Image (cartoon, helix red, strand yellow):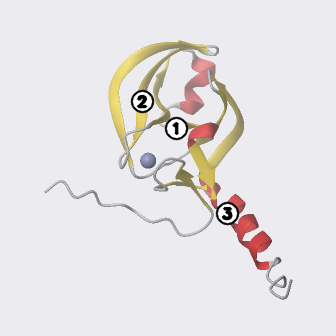
Amino acid sequence: MGRIFILDLDGRSYRCRFCNTPLALADHVLSRSFNCSQGSAYLFSNVVNVTLGPQEERSMMSGLHTVEDVHCCCCGQILGWKYVFAHDKSETYKEGKFVLERWTIVDDVAEDLNLDARAGSSDTENA
Ligand SMILES: [Zn+2]
C-alpha cells in the first residue's frame, strides 16, 4: 500500500529539484516576477504531484491571505504555497493559484542545454 501515482507531463515542465518529480507545465506559468523570502518564485495556474498542508492565515507584502503549503508528494519538500483566499479585493486573481519557489524547481530547458554540451566534446579520443 501507499504507492504514489506520479503524473507525467507532456511538454516543457518544471520538476522538483530534490527528486525530479514533474510538478508543472511551463505553459501554466502566469508570472515569473513573484518574490518570497528565499528569492524569486513563479505563479502557476495549475500544478500536479503535490500535497497541500492545512489552511492558515499569512500576512504577505500584498496583504493578508489564506494559504496552504505546497509539498512535493514524493519527497515531502515544501515547494511553495497555494492561495486559497485573498482578503484584499485587488489580489483575488491569485485565488486557487500556486506559487512555487524558484530554488526548489528545475526546468527541462536547462537539461537540454547540458545534453548539447556533452554531444559537442566527443572528438578527443586520440590524445
Ligand atoms: Zn520532490
- Residue at mark 3 to residue at mark 1: CA–CA distance: 26 Å
As drawn, 73 above or below 5: above
- Residue at mark 1 to residue at mark 2: CA–CA distance: 12 Å
As drawn, 47 above or below 62: below
What residue is shown at x 62% (from left), y 38% (from top)? 103
Inspect the image, locate mark 3, and give the three-letter code of the amino acid beneath it.
Answer: Glu
Choose mark 2 or mark 3, whichever is in front.
Answer: 3
As drawn, 53 above or below 90: below
Q: Nearer the viewer, residue 108 or 123?
A: 123
Name the N-terminal-most of marks 3 and 1: 1
As drawn, 42 above or below 14: above
Choose mark 1 or mark 2, whichever is in front.
Answer: 2
Quarter the C terminus occupies: bottom right
Give the residue number, with chain letter if any, for mark 3: 111
Task: Tell me if label 1 and label 2 are in contact, CB under 8 Å.
Answer: no
Quarter the N terminus occupies: bottom left
Name the N-terminal-most of marks 2 and 3: 2
Inspect the image, locate mark 2, and give the three-letter code of the amino acid beneath it.
Answer: Asp
Choose mark 3 or mark 1, whichever is in front.
Answer: 3
What residue is shown at x 59% (from left), y 32% (from top)? 93
Residue 4 at what x, y percent from top left?
A: 27, 57
Residue 60 at what x, y percent from top left?
A: 58, 14
Farthest-out residue, left: 1
Give the residue number, with chain letter if any, for mark 1: 97
At numbered mark 2, what does the secondary structure look like: helix, strand or loop?
strand
What residue is shown at x 71% (from left), y 59% (from top)? 110
